[in-house]
Amino acid sequence: MYNLGMERLENYYNQIKNSPVFFGMNDKELKDLLECFNARVRKYEEGEMIIRQGDMISNIYLILSGEVNIEKDSYWGRRIIISRLSVNDNLALSFVGSKNVESNIDAVTVTDTVVLILGYEKCTSMCQNACTRHKILINNLFQILSKENIELIQKIENVSQKSIRDKLLTYLSNEAQKKHSNVFDIQFNRQDLADYLNIDRSAMSFELSKLQKEGLIAYNKNHFELKGV
């Protein structure tokens, strides 16, 4: 890990400004907030951990570029992908809001990744003047946390299906609904998808092939098309 330094923060300003975290702030409010929070930018190389299981999390991490897996290892070392996050997503917002709770997940970069780091205590502590920017930020964080909870419910729906076939069909159906199209790309390769759905890769590949032969789906790598029954 190496710090890009505050002198590079301005290079990402337009992207930061368009993040849902800062939605509704004007330029002065945003610049004052970034200065107040001593916002900093860091770059992580592919495969690095931003957060480890057991860490006490005291910062909010906003992804400016790249992708990050939220993962958990079982006692026997099997990897489970909980979610994959990308630009404008936040890392571990649920944990940072719970004081004295250790992280039970790893946040691992899938590609070279740049993040904006903000101190959580500053984010949630209203200044003496109860400035507008703090009110906007807290409201935005609440909405983002609500969105994360909705996505978690969807993940539970995906993995709670009894068979591999039903897990795949539920996942693909949910992805089609999110993309508002029956033709879409998924964010996972085969191994990552198996780890996300907590199923065996070979068995999953066999089931995908069956679904394609039955005419329910068509696919090429991570590109899928859902077909009518």
Image: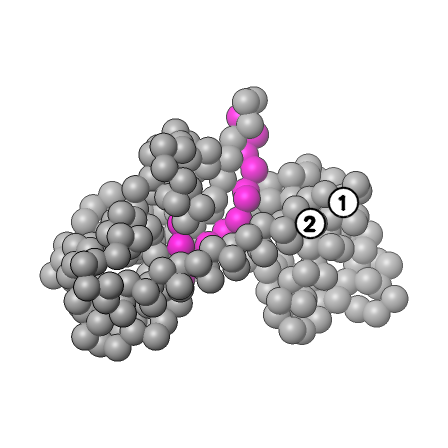
Q: Farthest residue in the bottom direction?
A: 26
As drawn, 73 above or below 196: above
Amino acid at dot 1? Gln
User: What residue is shown with label 1?
Assistant: 161
Which residue is more in the foreground, 6 or 137?
137
Which residue is more in the foreground, 184 or 36?
36
Amino acid at dot 2? Asn
Specify whether residue 62 is painted magenta.
no
Which residue is at a point 28% across and 63% down the rendered structure image? 134
User: What residue is shown with label 2?
Assistant: 158
Q: Circle 1 sits in a helix, a strand or a loop, which is it? A: loop
Percent of width and height locating residue 125: 26, 52
Which residue is more in the foreground, 55 or 222?
55
Indicate which disc residue 147 carries: none
Q: Is residue 58 left or right of residue 178?
A: left
Q: Are marks 1 and 2 in contact (CB under 8 Å)?
A: yes
Which residue is at a point 39% across and 45% down the rendered structure image? 97
Q: Is residue 175 left or right of residue 134?
A: right
Specify whether residue 89 is painted magenta.
yes
Gap in angstroms between the C-alphas marked 1 and 2: 6 Å
Magenta residues (range): 77-92
